[in-house]
Image (cartoon, helix red, strand yellow):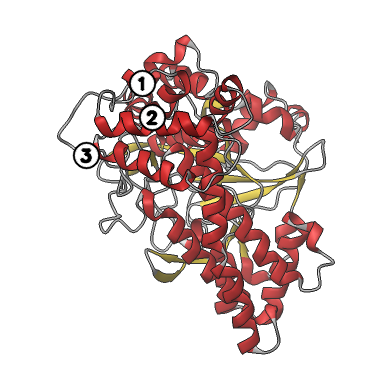
C-alpha cells in the first residue's frame, strides 16, 4: 500500500458483509481507463476522518474510480427488492458497490459507496455505468439538502472515467462516491421476506436495530419498536421535503431508507410555482409521486415495510397484522402533526390555535390560484415584502394577511421573535432547477466547473438571506415547455 493510501485516513469495517450471504454479492472491480477528480467535498472529508489534500492524489482517485481498494475494503453489491411505481420487482445494486464502512474519529459508521462503478450480478442487462451530468446533479442536490437540514445521503467526490457511456448519445462516464448512514432500504426487508428465511429476516432486523436504533434493543417487542421508529423518521423526513418544495420523483420502496435519510436523486427537483400536482419526472406519467402525493406514498411504502416485518412482530399471523395495522394507521396523524408544526414555523407561529390549519390551507389555496412561487412567497412574508409574493393587491390575499396578523397577536412571543423563527424555517435559496441545469451544462458541455462551484457556495448557506443570494432567488424565464427530469441511468 502506498504512503498516500495510508495517509488518506481510511478506517474501514465491513459489518454488512457479516450478514447472511443472500443479502449481498462480493464484487471484483471494473477498472476504468483514466479517472480524473472533478470535485471533492473537503467539508465532508474532515468529519469522516479523511485528509482532503491526500484525497486529491492519484491513489485516492483510483479508489473513487473503483480501480483500487483501501486496506480493509470488502467490495460488495447489496441485494434488495422494491415496489417500483406499485409493481414488485427483484432488484439490487446494479451499478454501485459498497467499498466498506468508514469508522470516523467520533466512532460513527458511514457506508462508502461507488455509484456508476460497473456491472454487478444485479445489473439486469445494464452496463452498470453512470454519466457525468446525473452524478454532478446528485452531488449538488444532496449537498443542498444537507445544508437545508434535511437528512440525506451525501456526496464525497465525483470522478470522470475517461470512457464514454452510451445512452441516447455518447456521454462522458463518471462515478460518484456516496456517503450514507447505511443503504438498508424498505426494499431490503422486502427482499428478506420474499427470498430469505425468517432467520435471515431476523438477522437483518437485529443488524438494523444495532446500527440505527440501539436504544430499542431492550424493548418488549423490539421489532414492533423498529417499525414505530422508522415511521417516526419517515413522517419527519417527508414533512421536511414538503417544507421546501422538494419532489423526490421516484419514491419506490427501494428508495426509502430505514435510517430516515433521503436517497436517490435521479429525477428529483424543487417546485417553483406552488401546485400540489407538480410532477417533474419523465417516467411518472400518472403523477403517482407528485408533490402533494408524497405523504400518502410514504404511508404506502411503510405499509410494505410492516408487511415484511410480520413474521417478527408476533408468532400469530392475525395478531401480527393487527399490531402492524395499528402502527401504520397512525402515520397520517403523525405526519399531519409534523406538517402543521413546520407550517406554523414558516409563518412565525409558536403556539397552537384551532384556526391554524384553515389559515395555512387558505394561504396555500391562494398561492395555487395566483401561481405564486413557493419559496419566494414565504421569503417575502418573512421580510414583510408583500409586493414580492405575486399575490399583492389581491382581495383574498389582503384578507388572509389581516387574519395572519391577528393570529400573530394571539401569541406571547414578540414580532421580532416571530421574524427570527421564520428566518430559520424559510430558506432564501433552493437548488432552482434552471440554476442546476445551467451548472450541469457548463460542466458537461464546456468543462467549466466554476458555475457549479458558485452555486454550491450559495446553496451551502440557504438561511443566510444575504445580498449575494438575490440572483439565485429569481425564477427562470417564462417558457411553454414544462421542466422534465430523468433518472439518469
User: In the picture shown, does residue 79 fall above or below 46?
Assistant: below
Q: Which residue position is annotated with label 1?
A: 386
**Which of the two discs, 1 and 3, labels the residue nearer the N terminus?**
1
CA distance for labels 1 and 3 = 28 Å
Report if the CB atoms under discs 3 and 2 are less than 8 Å apart.
no
Query: How far, Cα to Cα, is label 3 from label 2?
Result: 31 Å
For residue 202, which quarter of the picture?
Answer: bottom right
Asked if disc 2 and disc 1 are in contact, CB closer than 8 Å, the reply is: yes
Where residue 409 appears, as percent x and y from the top left, is 54, 29
Q: Residue at left 67%, top 43%? A: 69
Q: Residue furthest left?
A: 480
Q: Residues within 10 Å of mark 3 (few under 14, many from 20)?
A: few
Q: Of tags 3 and 2, which is closer to the observer? A: 2
Which residue is at a point 55% across and 78% down the rendered structure image?
Answer: 194
* Sooner in the amino-acid sequence: mark 2 or mark 1: 1
Mark 1 residue crowding within 10 angstroms, few (<14) / some (14–19) / many (20+):
some
Indicate left or right for 435 with 80 as reference.
Answer: left
Left or right placement of residue 477 versus residue 317 in this view: left
Closer to the chain start, of discs 3 and 2, is 2
What crowding class fits label 2: few (fewer than 14 Cα within 10 Å), some (14-19), or many (20 or more)?
A: some
Label drawn at residue 482: 3
Q: Is residue 203 visible?
A: no
Q: Please give the name of the residue rendered at 67% of the width and 70% of the height, measured from the top-left corner.
A: 21
Using the image, determine if residue 300 lies above or below residue 459.
below
Marks 2 and 1 sit apart, C-alpha to C-alpha, by 9 Å
Quadrant placement of the N terminus: top right
The residue labelled by disc 2 is 401
Q: Position of residue 79 (x, y in %)?
A: 56, 64
Amino acid at each position: 500500500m502506498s504512503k498516500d493510501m495510508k495517509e488518506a485516513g481510511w478506517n474501514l469495517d465491513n459489518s454488512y458483509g457479516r450478514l447472511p450471504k443472500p443479502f449481498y454479492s462480493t464484487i471484483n472491480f471494473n477498472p476504468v481507463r483514466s479517472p480524473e477528480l472533478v470535485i471533492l467535498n473537503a467539508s465532508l472529508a474532515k468529519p469522516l476522518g479523511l485528509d482532503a489534500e491526500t484525497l486529491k492524489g492519484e491513489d485516492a482517485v483510483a479508489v473513487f474510480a473503483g480501480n483500487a481498494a483501501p486496506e480493509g475494503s470488502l467490495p460488495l453489491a447489496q441485494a434488495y427488492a422494491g415496489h417500483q411505481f406499485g409493481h414488485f420487482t427483484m432488484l439490487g445494486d446494479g451499478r454501485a458497490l459498497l467499498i466498506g464502512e468508514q469508522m470516523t474519529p467520533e466512532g460513527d459508521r458511514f457506508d462508502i459507496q461507488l455509484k456508476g462503478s460497473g456491472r454487478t450480478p444485479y445489473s439486469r442487462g445494464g452496463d452498470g455505468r453512470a454519466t457525468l451530468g446525473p452524478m454532478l446533479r446528485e452531488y449538488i442536490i444532496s449537498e443542498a439538502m444537507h445544508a437545508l437540514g434535511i437528512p440525506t445521503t451525501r456526496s464525497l467526490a465525483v470522478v470522470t472515467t475517461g470512457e464514454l457511456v452510451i445512452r441516447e448519445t455518447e456521454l462522458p462516464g463518471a462515478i460518484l462516491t456516496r456517503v450514507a448512514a447505511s443503504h438498508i432500504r424498505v426494499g431490503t426487508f422486502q427482499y428478506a421476506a420474499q427470498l430469505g428465511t425468517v432467520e435471515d429476516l431476523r438477522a437483518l432486523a437485529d443488524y438494523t436495530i444495532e446500527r440505527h436504533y440501539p436504544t430499542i434493543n431492550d424493548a418488549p417487542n423490539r421489532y414492533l419498536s423498529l417499525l414505530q421508529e422508522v415511521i417516526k423518521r419517515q413522517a419527519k423526513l417527508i414533512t421536511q421535503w414538503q417544507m421546501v418544495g422538494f419532489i423526490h420523483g421516484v419514491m419506490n420502496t427501494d428508495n426509502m431508507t430505514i435510517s430516515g435519510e433521503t436517497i436517490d436523486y435521479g429525477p428529483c427537483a424543487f417546485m417553483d410555482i406552488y401546485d400540489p400536482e407538480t410532477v417533474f419526472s419523465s417516467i411518472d406519467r400518472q403523477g403517482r409521486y407528485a408533490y402533494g402525493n408524497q405523504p400518502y406514498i410514504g404511508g404506502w411504502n411503510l405499509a410494505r415495510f410492516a408487511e415484511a416485518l410480520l413474521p417478527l412482530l408476533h408468532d400469530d399471523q392475525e395478531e401480527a397484522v393487527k399490531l402492524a395495522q395499528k402502527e401504520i394507521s397512525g402515520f397520517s396523524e403523525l405526519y399531519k402533526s409534523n406538517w402543521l408544526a413546520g407550517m406554523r414555523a414558516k409563518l412565525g407561529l409558536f403556539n397552537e390555535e384551532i384556526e391554524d390549519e384553515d389559515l395555512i390551507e387558505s394561504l396555500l389555496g391562494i398561492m395555487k390560484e395566483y401561481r405564486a412561487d413557493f419559496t419566494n412567497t414565504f421569503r417575502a412574508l418573512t421580510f414583510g415584502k408583500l409586493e414580492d409574493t405575486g399575490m399583492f393587491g389581491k382581495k383574498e390575499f389582503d384578507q388572509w394577511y389581516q387574519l395572519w396578523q391577528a393570529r400573530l397577536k394571539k401569541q406571547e412571543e414578540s414580532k421580532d421573535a416571530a421574524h427570527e423563527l421564520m428566518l430559520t424555517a424559510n430558506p432564501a435559496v433552493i437548488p432552482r432547477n434552471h440554476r442546476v441545469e445551467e451548472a450541469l451544462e457548463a460542466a458537461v458541455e464546456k468543462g467549466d466547473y466554476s458555475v457549479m462551484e458558485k452555486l454550491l457556495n450559495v446553496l451551502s448557506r440557504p438561511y443566510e438571506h444575504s445580498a449575494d443570494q438575490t440572483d439565485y432567488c429569481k425564477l427562470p424565464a417564462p417558457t411553454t415547455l414544462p421542466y422534465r427530469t430523468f433518472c439518469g441511468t
